[in-house]
Image (cartoon, rainbow, N blue to C red):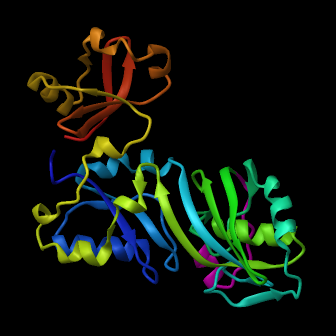
Amino acid sequence: MNNNQGWINLYKPKNLSSFQAIKKIKKNFSIEKIGHAGTLDPLAEGILPVALGKTTKLIPFVAMNLKKYKFTITWGSQTSTDDISGSILHTSDNFPSQNKILSNLKNYSGIISQVPPTVSAVKINGKRAYKLARENKKFEINSKNVYIKNLKLIKHNQDSSIFEIECGKGFYIRSLARDFARDLGTFGHISSLERLKVGRFTKESSIFLDDLLKIGKRLADINCVRPSVSMLDDILAYEIVDENDLKDISMGKTIKIDEKKLENISLITTEEKDFFLSHNGDIVSIGKLNRNLFKPKKVLI
């Protein structure tokens, strides 16, 4: 495995933006190229997949994975940001019962329509919504379809409830709190949010930011870098060992793949899906496979 590329399964603390967390790692270890998959709000904590070096090219594939969150909705008030950082817009003395919450959960399953929060990174005519909100400009955000695999109630108190959700790309937990509260005849906002999982990146195997920064000052000191192929979920991958193949791939050339080693891979699906080549645990190229010919689209060596 090449230590100059790969993944770090980072646990981001509260009160720090995803960008600030990445900046600290970049500065501490003098890393030239670094990125992250799936932004976490400053008030949220939890899993932030961090890509090093050429692994940054794989970020879109991780961002598409299912994510799991644990969150608290505080009932009775809606805020300008749909979380505790905003100013209160509306209040209500109506607190939903546990039975009413449970009976309404069925409406939040599968593909649903959702409008992102006003204070979000969604672009409106090329400008981020949160910037327009800071400038007190009026604008509308279009709804979009998002996916909920599972939503369940963990604990209920009179004025707040704890939930766990598994959802797809582009889902806003803050929007869920706002919409679910309205369906229950009240108002609500997110008062705590923790991301437990992004694909194969889990809380159990993560490293806290402070612990990571204490490891050392060199990239070689980081002992928690995962090979790039190991953290990609449900991909078609083929390990290449021939040095000539590696050389051809590095120049963007098409190479032949041993058909005997492709017996377990459906060539029908590979025409639609991206195909990955790996070497010593790291992805070296992403492309398309036509029968036994691999044509690279992206090269990571």
Q: Is residue 134 magenta?
A: yes
Q: Nearer the viewer, residue 92 or 119?
A: 92
Give the magenta-colored segment's residue range.
128-145
Q: Is residue 21 above or below residue 50?
A: below
- Pinpoint residue 157: horizontal percent, then vertical percent: 74, 80
Q: Is residue 281 above or below residue 261?
A: below
On the question of residue 158 being in view, the answer is: yes
Left or right side of 183 for 83? left
Q: Is residue 63 magenta?
A: no
> Which residue shows up at 25% across the image and 12% down it?
258
Q: Residue furthest bottom?
A: 87
Q: Nearer the viewer, residue 36 or 214?
A: 214
- Pinpoint residue 10: horizontal percent, then vertical percent: 35, 65
**Location of residue 255 (image quadrant):** top left
On the question of residue 49 being in view, the answer is: no
Left or right side of 297 for 176? right
Q: Is residue 223 above or below residue 282?
A: below
Left or right side of 171 for 177? right
Q: Is residue 268 above or below residue 231?
A: above
- Pinpoint residue 284: horizontal percent, then vertical percent: 24, 36
- Pinpoint residue 141: horizontal percent, then vertical percent: 72, 64
> Which residue shows up at 45% across the image and 16% down it?
266
